[in-house]
Amino acid sequence: MNIQELNAFIQKEKEEHQLSLKELSDGHHTFEELYRHRMVLFCALCNTYPELSWKSKKHFDEIHDPMFPGDFIAGINTPEGVATYHFKMAYWDLFQVPVMEHAPYYDHYTSEMVLERVSSLVKQKK
């Protein structure tokens, strides 16, 4: 089975509610564990730079791009642009950053661009 076939199989099983992606593992970590790690690390970054960070319960355009139910968006303004992640409302209070009425405009950045933007904070510290 190649990667495309495996991904198609996983998607089909997920859609039929027979598979929880949270429980999938690479043998070391589950998806759920990796997402919690991402949340804690991004929260630590935002809380370290509260003057650059923010959180919001609404996207920039809440009519055409409503927030995912039960989620909020947290972001940090880097030298290369905004980097954001969505998190469950259960984690709202962990982010000790300013609240914005609406998140900044989404400039169609990719996951790779988020990594580059966050990395620009490291480069800035040198």
Image (cartoon, rainbow, N blue to C red):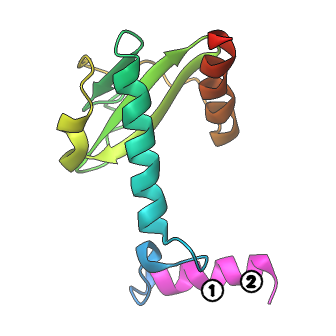
Q: Amino acid at mark 1?
A: Phe
Q: Position of residue 123 (x, y in %)?
A: 69, 16
Residue at the image position 24 percent from the left and 25 percent from the top = 96
Q: Position of residue 35 (x, y in %)?
A: 44, 56
What residue is disc 2 on?
5
Q: Which residues are magenta?
A: 1-14
The residues tagged by marks 1 and 2 sit, at their Cα atoms, a distance apart of 6 Å
Which part of the image, by quadrant, shows the N terminus?
bottom right
| Residue shown at the point (56%, 78%) measured from the top left | 11
Q: Find the residue positioned furthest to the right.
A: 2
Q: Which residue is mark 1?
A: 9
Q: Is residue 108 visible?
A: yes
* In the image, residue 37 above or below residue 18: above
Q: Residues within 10 Å of mark 2 (few under 14, many from 20)?
A: few
Q: Is residue 60 visible?
A: no
Q: Secondary structure at mark 1?
A: helix
Instruction: Assess disc 1: are there few (<14), some (14-19) or many (≥20) residues with their C-alpha within 10 Å of its C-alpha.
Output: few
